[in-house]
Amino acid sequence: MEEKRVSPSELASRLGVHPGSISRIFNYKHMHSSLLQKISQALGHDFFKYFTQDIKVERPASDKQIDELKKELDVLRKESGYLKQINELLSKQGTTTNENQTSHEG
């Protein structure tokens, strides 16, 4: 409030509360996030940035499943690449074998 040069009565007006409520609000041990959001907007300051480092958000199970599927897909792509290489080598070997048989027959 001091940085923004907003008086308690001005903040009360912006929040739509009685001026006497302002001192009580700042003495709360706990504050609901909706009230903190209103104060942030009224003062033009993001108070939530001080808490985001400490917040651990549990990712939904679907996000974890997507990550696991992506890893599995990467493994399958590598295996597919190896199988293509093996197939190409076998095809070349078959062609060479056929050429050798043809040359021996003639």
Image: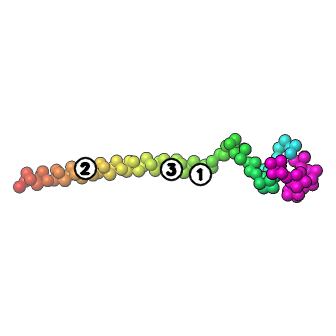
Marking on residue 62: 1
Q: Position of residue 32 (x, y in %)?
A: 81, 49
Contact between labelled residues 2 and 1, with CB atoms less than 8 Å apart: no
The residue drawn where x is 80% and y is 53% is 43
The residue drawn where x is 84% and y is 41% is 29
Q: Does the image show residue 38?
A: no
Q: Position of residue 31 (x, y in %)?
A: 82, 47
The residue drawn where x is 47% and y is 48% is 72
Marking on residue 90: 2
- As rendered, which of 23 and 30 lies closer to the eye? 23
* SS for callout 3: helix
Mark 2 to mark 3 CA distance (whole Å): 31 Å
* SS for callout 1: helix
Q: Which residue is mark 3?
A: 69
- As rendered, which of 27 and 12 lies closer to the eye? 12
Mark 1 closeness class: few <14, some 14–19, many ≥20 residues within 10 Å: few
Contact between labelled residues 3 and 2, with CB atoms less than 8 Å apart: no
**Residue with the most extreme left position:** 106
In which quadrant is the C terminus drawn? bottom left
Mark 1 to mark 2 CA distance (whole Å): 41 Å
Q: Is residue 58 left or right of residue 79?
A: right
Q: Amino acid at mark 3?
A: Leu
Which range is magenta? 1-25
Mark 3 to mark 1 CA distance (whole Å): 10 Å
